Amino acid sequence: MDESLILAQKALESANEAKFIANNIWMLMATVLVFMMHLGFATLEAGFVRRKNVVNILFKNIMIVSVGLLSYYTIGFGLMYPGVEGGYFEFGGFGLTNPEGAAGMIDYASGNYTYYTDFIFQAMFAATCCTIVSGAVAERVKLLPFLVFCLLFVTISYPITGYWKWGAGWLDALGFYDFAGSTLVHSVGGWGALAGAILVGPRLGKYTKKGIKPIPGHSMPLATVGVFLLWFGWFGFNGGSVLSADPGLVSLVFVTTAVAAAAGCIGAFVISKLVYRSFDLGIALNGILGGLVGITASADGVSVVSAIIIGLVAGAIIPLSISFFDKIKVDDPVGATSVHLVCGIWGTIAVAIFGNYDEGVGTLSAQLIGIAAIGVFTFTFAFVVFFVLKKVVGVRVDKEEETIGLDICEHQATAYS
Amino acid sequence: MDESLILAQKALESANEAKFIANNIWMLMATVLVFMMHLGFATLEAGFVRRKNVVNILFKNIMIVSVGLLSYYTIGFGLMYPGVEGGYFEFGGFGLTNPEGAAGMIDYASGNYTYYTDFIFQAMFAATCCTIVSGAVAERVKLLPFLVFCLLFVTISYPITGYWKWGAGWLDALGFYDFAGSTLVHSVGGWGALAGAILVGPRLGKYTKKGIKPIPGHSMPLATVGVFLLWFGWFGFNGGSVLSADPGLVSLVFVTTAVAAAAGCIGAFVISKLVYRSFDLGIALNGILGGLVGITASADGVSVVSAIIIGLVAGAIIPLSISFFDKIKVDDPVGATSVHLVCGIWGTIAVAIFGNYDEGVGTLSAQLIGIAAIGVFTFTFAFVVFFVLKKVVGVRVDKEEETIGLDICEHQATAYS
Amino acid sequence: MDESLILAQKALESANEAKFIANNIWMLMATVLVFMMHLGFATLEAGFVRRKNVVNILFKNIMIVSVGLLSYYTIGFGLMYPGVEGGYFEFGGFGLTNPEGAAGMIDYASGNYTYYTDFIFQAMFAATCCTIVSGAVAERVKLLPFLVFCLLFVTISYPITGYWKWGAGWLDALGFYDFAGSTLVHSVGGWGALAGAILVGPRLGKYTKKGIKPIPGHSMPLATVGVFLLWFGWFGFNGGSVLSADPGLVSLVFVTTAVAAAAGCIGAFVISKLVYRSFDLGIALNGILGGLVGITASADGVSVVSAIIIGLVAGAIIPLSISFFDKIKVDDPVGATSVHLVCGIWGTIAVAIFGNYDEGVGTLSAQLIGIAAIGVFTFTFAFVVFFVLKKVVGVRVDKEEETIGLDICEHQATAYS
């Protein structure tokens, strides 16, 4: 009996270790997929700007990832996941403070993945919110002030609102639900984008007395590559947000994510064909992204049919929202506010309409409170930072530089030669 | 004794759960890799067409993925995997009809992956066959009729022939073997491409009295990116077709897939150097794809040396086949018929020559019957659909539009500005 | 008692099988990620060369992967991992000689992955060293002699020095440590690049009486895509070098790899801003790569803070090293010697400074001996091969061809049309 008991215990330990390894692999693969989203954003934004501002937007994107990873490591992670209960502005400490020994890592997060895995997955998410902003203020924002904004946004603003929900803060206690971040990541980026676009102002020649002038991007292949890479990465963004390799949940998330993206494309296609009478590639691409942002809050808790509806609506919103922002003269070269802010809000509300969650989780009131609280905080934070930067050092290049292009003026280089 | 028995049972359950998690992760990662093939096709085709038709081909590619995913969900999946025995045109129902509860998912497919995983992996495959067609009819096909063709092709034709083999239909019973779809996916796409290219007709100025005019693609970097992404994705296409993470089989498939692609490159390189006296990048790229298509039917059942031979032959076929189709004036801007149809047939025959399968599986007669049956069905289906569309609404843009380019005429846009 | 003992044994076997499956999946995913680095190199190099040499560099890159995989299969793998003890030039045989039966595969490498997995992961690494060379000699090297060099380099030189450490040869016995190949892969490529750049000579018009003329690359978006893809692939390059899915080690490697890359970007940014007063995208991109090369030798054995320091220094080295090579008139269009050779040496020394390894492993003397021995062997090998090729067939295109461009002269094609 002794022998078989010892063997059985050994077998159980070994089995649990195998599950741990498998879960951890999935979280790391999800991390790699989310990393790819940064290339997705870089190429999407590069494709949607004019030829004269391409080096600048690429430069901004690699700096954002780099600054984001290091500052989230230094402060952001400790702020977002303080590991203590209660409080609005707890701080878990600089750097990685949890026990770093093998045992500490193995027991981390209910045995699903290590502490390092947790950090690197979260860090890949964090940098995303700034990348969203960079698209909206592209082609006229000054490089260094923008990087200062990014540093503050990813180090302070994003972790605080993130903590409210994912760090088990007050919104979590309230029943607010946001699976992978329609609000916590995308709307947060979107609010920053809106504040930035307002304070930086529209590009020269965009809104004239003769009307709104379309300023087409310089490379549709680059933009298309970007959207496909974002879709690719989103399987990790949503799939990894299960926080384990749970087969039922992760595979459901894959299906809802994929069909919502596809439906977003169709929704944008149909509306832009009906309303604007064109097969607009840019709109269809943003429709895919809208569908992805829309499903992000509820990818783990809706039926496939619901996911299709969420995506269709998100896609249909895109052309209308882009027109709306143009009407109120908020110039956003890549449509980031429509995709991330508006569809992010839609997705967060959709939780209350379509979500199959526990009683009291994801109620309409909780969702609206979460959207409002995070919106007010983030927009205010971003507005104040941009406003102060504007007054102190200026956030916009001068007219001559804007006309010549940021590549020549800020980088003494051209994207193509 | 009781205690150790209970513990041993618990350990065994836990171990089986770990295997299930690991297998499911692999199938989902394979799904993500196959998804990337859609970006591969999009960039390959965009690179191989002229500058004036780039927006159009990109637009088609995102629509195909989106339409493909949704229509395969709605009808195709139920048609291809009816889950019943016998019959040619069984139908498993609309949408996902299997038990969606946790238990139902866990027990699905011998415990290797969930029902959702099965669907999403298959759905990523399904859209591929239309993407193959889009390359062959590029630069002159009308957008909406082509999308109607895709819808019918992916919803009806592909699932029916797929069912014959992978849905345990009559070709499966006959001993026909096609591991990951040299015939079921690639030749199917290739037959559609051939039917489309014939009925749409060659591009203006391609075949003149003075001979065949080469029409070079507008961007070789884009085309190269496409081929690398397709190769990347093929590790999931073939590796996922093991339908579990079986270490021996999946790793063998990785090796055979990689060396066949490499050998395809060398085969195409050597023949094009010997016969056409040039280092032709486009031919070498298509040689890689030919090698990949060729190994797809037998990647799980040939030796490494056999895989190299299969790849070499497939690569060598490419320049000869491209010349052949040009001689019979079937204009295919990206070489899709040579890559997917001709090398698909070669790969399916190679099963009978090199494959190490059970007695009665993959015999030459079974392979030839499979190739013929699926070829006749698919070509007829595609021909009839294109023919009806041609008669009813037309499938080709008018000469002026073709000369100006589809980007301006169908999308009022340009790919670059 | 019998029953529970049998069940416990079955459970243990099942658990071990699950671990084996999970480990093997990770190694295969790492393989796929490393494969993507070849596209990274292809796009990076294509972006950094002039428009007239793009087809040529793309052609070289697909040939290198293809030739590399096949020749490493045929000879290199047997040379690098002879599977016997002692000796400098053992040879394990042509092709894959280990037992290929299911049992043999399962027991391979302590049960972490199969023999096929081992081969394909190593084969993906092998081709990398030639790709590094191709960047340094771009825009003027003759195609066929360069491919002959690659064949010899990947079949003979790389496996021999690789065997010294990873094949358990004399450097391994000495305590030399190089986790994933700062020296064994990157410096080896870098020494080849240096030998090639010296013997091929600088591009026409690079070093003139009026000073050093910058020759900007033709597409910064392509170069940026390349760096992101290399970073993406490096998670597999370093993460897979753990040679299992060990959660603690692989996740630590992810974190150190990511922060070193980010710090490399910042280091290069700061130095190039301070010293050269510019926001140079090319420098920042190479800073990321420098950080990645730098951390490669010690990613599994340094703290996160150490990884940041290693990356910062590596990044700071980049602009200085590029200036240095320009001063001594070694023309390297993509900065491969600075990135792979200089940062590779730095990373190998950093093992002795920051590494937490067992007593006697990674001592400064062992590291310096390893750097020197591999450097002398590789540089000599590469120099001799290039020298002989230069004398016998020539390694450089003539002036007219260089002026017109290799695309037209060697391929009768253009990259864009």
Image (spheres, coloured by chain):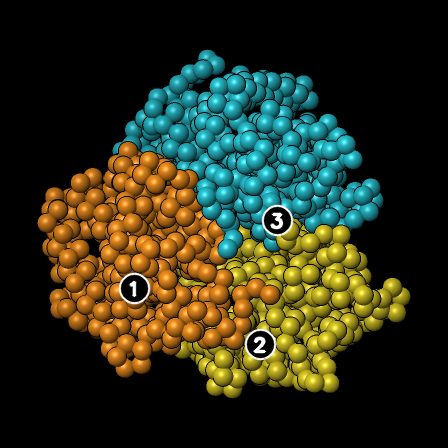
Chain colours: A yellow, B orange, C cyan
Whether residue B325 is situated above or below residue A284 in the rendered picture: above
Element on which disc 1 rests: helix
Q: What distance separates the C-alpha of mark 1 from that of mark 3? A: 35 Å
Q: Residue at x 41, y 37 (%)?
A: C66
Q: What distance separates the C-alpha of mark 2 from that of mark 1? A: 40 Å
Q: What distance separates the C-alpha of mark 2 from that of mark 3? A: 37 Å
Residue B42 lies, in percent from the top left, at 44, 60
Task: Report which residue position mark 2 lands on.
Answer: A343
Mark drawn on residue C218: 3
**Which one is in front, B273 or B343?**
B273
Give the foreground label among 2 and 3.
3
Left of B218 or right of it: where is A372?
right
Q: Amino acid at mark 3?
A: His
Task: Report which residue position mark 1 lands on.
Answer: B197
Left of C248 or right of it: where is A58?
right
Q: Chain of mark 2?
A: A
Task: Determine the residue located farthest toward the top in the rendered image.
Answer: C87
Whether residue C148 is situated above or below residue B251 in the rendered picture: above
Mark drawn on residue C49: none
The quadrant in which residue C203 appears is top right
Q: Residue at x 28, y 59 (%)?
A: B330
Left of A307 or right of it: where is C190?
right
Element on which disc 3 rests: loop
- Mark 1 and mark 3, same subunit? no
Q: Amino acid at mark 2?
A: Cys
**Which one is in front, B27 or B61?**
B61
